[in-house]
Structures are given as structure tokens and as C-alpha cells.
Image (cartoon, rainbow, N blue to C red):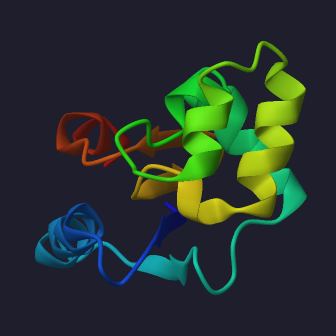
Amino acid sequence: MNIQIFGTSKSFDTKKAERYFKERRIKFQSIDLAKYGMSGREFDSVLRAVGGIDNLIDWDKKHPDIDLMRYMDDPVAKEDKVYDNPALMRCPVVRNGQKATVGYCPEVWETWT
């Protein structure tokens, strides 16, 4: 298993995800989204795994770009905006190869082990 956890240090759900894997002694790589973001291939892989850009966006966040994206019909424009500003993503994004989840999803991670 090659677990990657993309999140921010202030995200409570990111901390819960890290604790979940630590408690089960599963090695993981923690990546700060605000500092490093995702590579283009990682971003594309996550988009395919979670079912599109609308599942990756944190719609509850108070941000002018989120308000703008509510009225955008073009998914490619949304993808570009989120790729350029990873703070718009819901945290954590947990990857295991081609599989990925957004948010705290221990029931899905259980099937990975």
C-alpha cells in the first residue's frame, strides 16, 4: 500500500485521517496542500477516482472563487481554478494508487487494507 494524505495542518479531518493510519501502523506520506499542492498527474488521478471536480471542491468554504464556481458550467475551468488554488479542495484527499477519497472516509480505507 502506498498511502498519500493531502491536507492542511489546520484541518481537523486531516489530523483524524493521519491518526487513523497511525493507529493501524500503516505507513503514509503526508503532503501539505497549501505548501506543495498536487502534481498534474496526481490531480488527474484523484479527479477520476472521486468522480469529478464537483466532488473535490469544498463548497462550504467562504471564498470568492467558490462563489464564482457555483455559476460556472465548464468543468475544465473549474479544474484549472482548483489546481491553481489547492486551498479550494476538501481535505483530506487520501490516495492509494489509483484509488482516492475526499474527506474522512474510514469505511472506504478499511477496504484498502
Q: Is residue 94 above or below residue 58?
A: below
Q: Quadrant of residue 9?
A: bottom left
Residue at horizontal 60 percent and vertical 20 percent from the top: 51
Q: Is residue 32 above or below residue 17?
A: below
Residue at horizontal 73 percent and vertical 66 percent from the top: 38
x and y, in percent, of residue 76 in the image: 88, 28
Q: Nearer the viewer, residue 70 or 84?
A: 70
x and y, in percent, of residue 57 in the image: 53, 39
Q: Quadrant of residue 13?
A: bottom left
x and y, in percent, of residue 113 in the image: 31, 49
| Residue reaching furthest to the top | 73
Residue at horizontal 80 percent and vertical 22 percent from the top: 75
Q: Is residue 36 above or below residue 98?
A: below
x and y, in percent, of residue 61 in the image: 39, 49
Q: Nearer the viewer, residue 43 or 8?
A: 8
| Residue reaching furthest to the left | 23
Could you tell me how many numbered marks the image carries? 0
Q: Nearer the viewer, residue 46 or 70?
A: 70
Q: Nearer the viewer, residue 20 or 72?
A: 72
* Left or right of 17 on screen, residue 42: right
* Left or right of 34 on screen, residue 7: left
Q: Quadrant of residue 18?
A: bottom left
Residue at horizontal 63 percent and vertical 87 percent from the top: 35
